[in-house]
Image (cartoon, rainbow, N blue to C red):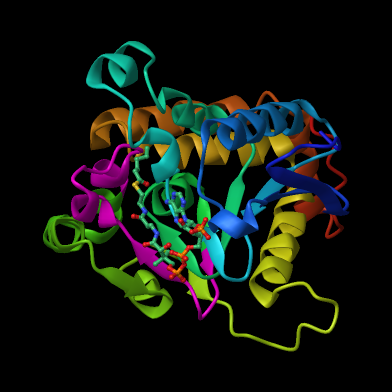
Amino acid sequence: FNKQYENILTARPEPGVALVTLNRPKALNALNSALFAELNEALRLIDADKEIGAIVITGSERAFAAGADIKEMKDKSFAEVYTDQFLADWQDLTSIRKPIIAAVSGYALGGGCELALMADILLAAPSAQFGQPEVNIGTITGGGGSQRLARAVGKSRAMELTLTGRMWSAQDAVAWGMASRVVEAGDAADGVLPVVREAVALAREIAAKSQVAVQAQKEAVNVAFEQGLSEGLRTERRLFHMTFATADQKEGMAAFAEKRKPNFTNS
Ligand code: HXC
């Protein structure tokens, strides 16, 4: 995945961690089809890379992403967007098995907010501004905003936010349960935003665990957003049982009993 892309940058900032940076700064990282195709390709390669255990997606200091590219889509006809399944490939991101952390600084609007909501963990810089302003340009959320925002912040807030198109702050995102926490601005001596540094550290911590357990845990939590409680509990229990077929469960529990650190082999 460490190749040259036009609209994103990819890096391996720490062992086990892939960092993907949206990189159309002049357009505030507006998400056009080319960018999403590159993002999907990079994520597919990262997911297949045995050396990587967790992924960070970020943007620039000013904008995580200011939405789907309005200039690209403004003249499309209904027939075109319908038959081409316009933006259906955004869904690809949700089939990535490894945990994805969104490190959001600045604007996360429209599709940018929806992209952040697709991540497994959301960390926000104090400057983060979220919004679903589609209603202001005569359309509606199309990348899962209506579903994921409602699940994250509740019906009344999701309605108020999407019907007014108003922005909300990093603090609100945390208070409402949409983001884990605000990462305060520290000194950015190395040019890395504190929220990105923190997301990479978190990714590294996750990447050091048994990857079988990590992926099963992600799958189990995601079931809470897809199935009812009894089905979800059954799936979780089956996945829990499944870990007993892994060497990492034997090693992890033996290490605890022997009072030593586990040596996971991802098997
Ligand atoms: C295309 C965009 C863009 C976008 C910004 N730009 N957002 N281009 N699509 N979504 C471009 C601007 O045209 C401008 O290009 C440059 O980025 C800088 O933006 P400015 O507007 O000059 O900056 P500023 O005045 O600071 O305002 C920032 C802003 C504003 C508040 C974020 O740009 C804005 O409102 N953007 C649109 C936000 C939005 O409506 N997003 C939702 C899109 S719909 P030039 O060439 O003029 O310098 C959507 C659908 C979701 O996302 C469905 C998806 C599945």
**Residue in the foreground of this view, choosing between 235 and 102:** 102
Q: Picture coordinates of residue 99 (x, y %)? A: 61, 44
Splitting the image into 4 quarters, where does residue 27 fall? bottom right
Give above or below for 251 relative to 170.
above
Residue under the point 55% across and 75% down = 125
Residue under the point 76% across and 47% down = 9
Q: Residue furthest top?
A: 83
| Residue 264 in view (yes/no) | yes
**Residue in the foreground of this view, choosing between 259 and 183:** 183
Give above or below for 138 relative to 226.
below
Q: Is residue 135 left or right of residue 207?
A: left
Residue under the point 77% across and 72% down = 192
Give above or below for 4 relative to 21.
above
Q: Is residue 212 left or right of residue 142?
A: right
| Residue 209 in view (yes/no) | no
**Residue in the foreground of this view, choosing between 83 and 251:** 83
Q: Is residue 142 left or right of residue 25?
A: left
Give above or below for 243 relative to 21.
above
Residue range corresponding to the magenta coloring = 123-148
